[in-house]
Image (spheres, helix red, strand yellow):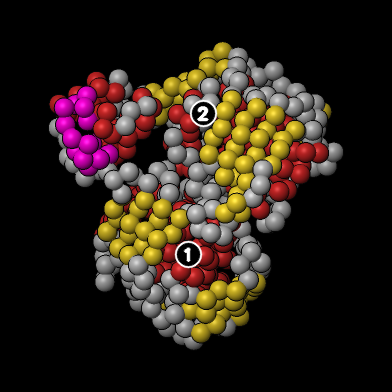
Amino acid sequence: MTQLTTAASIGRLVRDARKQRGLTQHELASLLSTSQSAIHRIESGNQNLSLEMINRIAQALESPLIVPGGRNAMNLSITGETALHGSITTRSSKNAAVALLCASLLNRGRTRLRGIAHIEEVNRLIEVLQSIGVQVTWSSDEADLTIVRPEVLDLANMDVSAARRTRSIIMFLGPLMHLADSFRLPYAGGCQLGARTVEPHMQALHAFGLDVIATEGYYNATALHSHPQHTIVLTERGDTVTENALMAAAMTPGETVLRNASPNYMVQDLCVFLMMLGVEIEGIGTTTLRIKGQAELNKDVTYTISEDPIEAMSLITAAVVTHSELTITRAPIEFLEIELAILHEMGLRFSIGQEYRSGNDFTRLVDITVKPSQLHAHEDKIHPMPFPGLNIDNLPFFAVIAATADGQTLIHDWVYENRAIHLLELTKLGANVQLLDPHRLNVIGPTAWRARDMVSPPALRPAVCILLAMLAARGESVLRDVYVINRGYEDLPTRLNNLGAEITQFFG
């Protein structure tokens, strides 16, 4: 691993290595003859460390936190074939978390987000928020995040490096148009999935009086303070587009009508949060939203982020691929019904418990128990659609599921140019995957998975598909450079190990 230059970077490594060892902060503190509060400061990036102290921590954790060689990658060693068992809880939504972090800029009061995930996408946005003067504080148990916006943001000091590593930075446009007459944002980054136009964002926000010009790696934005349109038709029913428009509408006095809005899970979370701040919203869960904005939002609020349907689908897939009986608790059923219907048609046996509410008192949850099943190929092609259709982020899991099924399945990823190509990596593990064009795959199963040493694809969901297939492959596989997985999943290897997997993290 390359030498690290920031306390925050070292803190994240210490936290990840501690969790891999299964130690609490208190237990690590005892090994180092220090206090739990000191460990908390280290892991939060609020403590500069000497090389001697870093070496002591590495020895206690049996982890080479810093080694020579100029490399900086986390890798996974996976021993299969794995039979999973037991129960696992669905954690909070990654996509809702990043939207709520952006929306916290709207609130002049104190925003407390409960259950927010410790993932790299969240870490990057926190780094950006802190760089512009926002106070961000983790609770002592690291479960909650408190955010306090200053009176004036220091936008000139924005952490450009962190901003470029997350596509979510584009959702700063909606809030910042109300907080600065002019500003600039770095071009958005994130997964490598092909061309992802930002033009729908620009069109929607222009209707609110924001003029954006893209030049030399930045979006240069100017708030025109013109009278906004009262009815806005989004040219794309995108999640982040809808969220940006929602945040722009939240501080636009009067009623704004958004048509062709996304009703997806992260949008619903954002709507419920904005309502806590005093924004009136009608039509949550539909494609038409009526928003009555306020000139100022100033409340101390605590919001519990709802559970992640994409993670729930990941865990369902883990059970399917390893032919295991596994219970996934706190699964947001409204956003999994189409996926489960397709799996039922393919022969998957599962049961669904009684509904109950998430901590936001809005999202409907269930417990799902998946049983070992012999699957057959789906008769029709499998393709995504805007909610309430099959979620675009869940489509890749059907590629690895289809590889376990008997017969030929057509996977049609019409949204992204490159993601289907990333799923070809499953062939290295023994799958029969044929690329028909950049958007369509034929997957022929069943597959006799084989172990392999390979580099993670640069896209989140395909990378997780590779990891799940490795659980089913006999022998030892190595998946290298898994930063992209850490962008969207918190401590996934340890959680899978608690179900019977054998995954070891190492750096190099």
Q: Nearer the viewer, residue 234 or 111?
A: 111
Residue at 61 percent of width and 58 percent of height: 264
Residue under pointer 1? 273
Instruction: Specify the principal SS of the magenta part.
Output: helix
Q: Residue at x 81, y 39 (%)?
A: 345
Q: Secondary structure at mark 2?
A: helix
Q: Residue furthest top?
A: 475
Q: Amino acid under label 2?
A: Leu
Residue 481's place in the image compared with 181, above or below, is above
Q: Is residue 41 magenta?
A: yes
In the image, taking residue 402 as reference, residue 228 lies left or right, namely left
Q: Is residue 380 left or right of residue 467?
A: right
Q: Which residue is mark 2?
A: 496
- Give the position of the C terminus as an image quadrant: top left
Q: Is residue 330 above or below residue 137?
A: above
Q: Position of residue 486 (x, y in %)?
A: 45, 38
* Left or right, residue 203 beside residue 386: left
* Badge 1 amino acid: Phe
**Residue drawn at point x = 66 percent, y = 53 percent:** 334
Q: Residues within 10 Å of mark 2 (few under 14, many from 20)?
A: some
Estimate the x, y position of residue 389 in percent, counting from the top left.
Answer: 71, 53
Q: How many marks?
A: 2
Write down the quadrant of residue 27 in the picture. Answer: top left
With 260 as the anchor, is 34 left or right in this view?
left
Element carrying mark 1: helix
Vertical comparison of 72 with 411: above or below: above
Q: Where residue 342 is drawn, which disc sits there?
A: none
Task: Please give the range of residues in magenta.
Answer: 29-43
Q: Earlier in the sequence, mark 2 or mark 1?
A: 1
